[in-house]
Amino acid sequence: MRIDLEVSLDPTLGCGQAHRWHKLDDGSWEGVWRNQVVTMKQISPTSVEVIGTDDRKGITRYLGGDDDLETIISEISKRDEYVASLTDRCPGMRILRQDHWECLATYLLATNANVKRIGQMVESVCDHFGDDLGRRHGFPTPKQILDGCGCIAECRLGFRESRFITLAERVESGDIDVESFSEMNYEECVAALQDINGIGPKVADCVALFAFENMEAFPIDARISKVMEDIYGVTGSYKAVSAYGREKFGEYAGYAQEFLYHADFISRQARSRNPCHCSWQKCRRSA
């Protein structure tokens, strides 16, 4: 199935928004979406070949196809020349529309872990509790996690283990209505998310942005904190730096954050391959 959409798969799927996409040797991306093993390959800057699902509308929405990318890029570019230059260098990057439960549970595991470690934990949880799809496993429901939680230690989640089980219990019991977050504005959403044990302001911003479409969210991790200091001279508390980003970039601040994150990610990747640069650190999307 061919999807006609201006989207660049490499930065969209490969820069830490979601953690179940793997790039294959032929340049395509394999992931699990709605309990289907899906492969996507870039055909042109405005088209993608999709194998594994025939849900054209659903996969287009997942890839951020509902966003008016031209308007978004125009808005954040006129607010900042540096971000404008980044959008020119990375056309087609979009913010994914992730499953609400999967995104929430995934980012609960993301506390104090780098992208590689997050991916390992998520795959382990899926392999232990999710539906067997052949090459991969689906992301488990809260009930599937609770039914099999006797072997949760095998997933090697560390201190996140009890928080993960508690989240599954609260969602399964109805104490947490995951869909209710989508009805909240940004401030309400991040406040409610932080009532969940294990979710701080960084994780709340990520979930608000990647699951619940609060495009003004501006998550701050160690990487973005350094960028904000180096490029904009902004330092301080999480609250202060994030508020600066939201004010500076406006209603699409989350897109500006992703361009800043991607540019630094690529820069550090390049330096890591050069033995003369030894200061590179693995990226962290930690709370």
Image (tube, grey):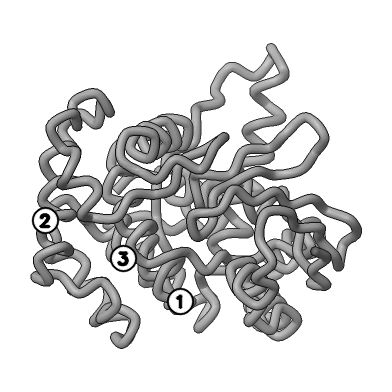
Counting from the top left corner in percent of width and height, residue 38 is at: 64, 51
Counting from the top left corner in percent of width and height, residue 97 is at: 52, 69
Residue drawn at point x = 70 percent, y = 48 percent: 39
On screen, residue 278 versus residue 77, left or right, reads left
Q: Amino acid at mark 3?
A: Ala
Q: Amino acid at mark 1?
A: Glu
Q: Which residue is mark 1?
A: 213
Are the residues at dot 1 and dot 3 in contact (C-beta closer than 8 Å)?
no
Judge the density around disc 1: few (<14), some (14-19), many (≥20) Cα neighbours within 10 Å. some
The quadrant of the picture occupied by the N terminus is bottom right
Say what secondary structure mark 3 lies in: helix
Counting from the top left corner in percent of width and height, residue 135 is at: 57, 34
Q: Earlier in the sequence, mark 3 or mark 2?
A: 2
Q: Which residue is mark 3?
A: 240
On screen, residue 10 versus residue 186, left or right, reads right
Q: Which mark is residue 169?
A: 2
Residue 173 placement: quadrant? bottom left
Q: Is residue 217 above or below residue 225?
A: below
Residue drawn at point x = 50 percent, y = 27 percent: 281
Q: Earlier in the sequence, mark 2 or mark 1?
A: 2
Are the residues at dot 3 and dot 2 in contact (C-beta closer than 8 Å)?
no
Residue at the far top in the pictured view: 275
Say which of 196 and 166 sits in front: 166
Judge the density around disc 2: few (<14), some (14-19), many (≥20) Cα neighbours within 10 Å. some
Calculate the distance from the C-alpha at mark 2 to the C-alpha at mark 1.
Answer: 25 Å
